[in-house]
Image (spheres, rainbow, N blue to C red):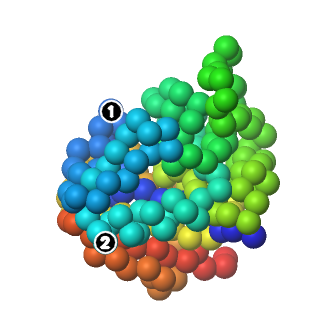
Amino acid sequence: MGKVISSASTSLDGFVAGPDDEVGPLFDWYEAGDRPWTSAGGDMTFHLTQADHDYWSGWVARLGALVVGRHLFDITDGWKGTHPLGVPVVVLTHSPPEGWGYPGGTVEFVTGGIHDAVARAKQVAGDADVGVAAGEIASQCLVAGLLDEVSVDLVPCFLGVGRPYFTAVAGQVVLGDPTTVVEGERLTHLVYPVQPG
């Protein structure tokens, strides 16, 4: 059985995007090297350093499904049915969009809550890991005891304001010692286990 892992590029002050969903320097590392990584649909290519490429490729290889919220789904138009990482996506929403769909897409909607969304993603992922989006989804998973690991691509910048990796609903949580520390190009990849609560 795979793990449930939140993952995001994050500023030092804990934001994954600005107030209008702009990412500023948080994704600069995707174009900081000469090692290409191409998305599942072939329409996006990053150029990573070797260390970042090794870390990123390893993360992607472990994934079997993603859980995201409706906001991320809406601003990406559901990745037109196929996520760049090439895995099925479970969207947690109060109300699925009417008339949305792309032929051959791997996006589905769950309305029953975070437990149902993660259960469905685990079913789809099989023995692979389930990635959960930062923000409200990661926070709900943490509060519900569903999160096994927190992955942070820590970028040396401050955004000052924006969308936090975890919302206040998560409260105070102490994570375990890092199981992964990888120095990338102007960021550090960190993975922390969530300690049983």
Element at label 2: helix
Give percent across and percent down for residue 20: 33, 33
Q: Which residue is mark 1?
A: 20
Give percent across and percent down for residue 18: 30, 41
> Residue 178 occupies which quadrant of the picture?
bottom left
Residue at 66% x, 79% y is 196
User: In this orientation, does residue 147 appear?
Assistant: no
The disc placed on residue 118 is none
196 to the left or right of 78: right
**191 up-or-down from 179: above or below:** above
Q: The disc labelled 2 sits on which kind of residue?
A: Ala
Q: 88 or 137, which lies in front?
A: 88
Q: Which residue is mark 2?
A: 51
Q: 7 or 41, which lies in front?
A: 41
**113 up-or-down from 154: above or below:** above
Residue at 71% x, 34% y is 109
Q: The disc labelled 1 sits on which kind of residue?
A: Asp
Q: Which residue sits furthest top? A: 99
Q: Which residue sits furthest bottom? A: 177
68 to the left or right of 41: right
User: In this orientation, does residue 196 appear?
Assistant: yes
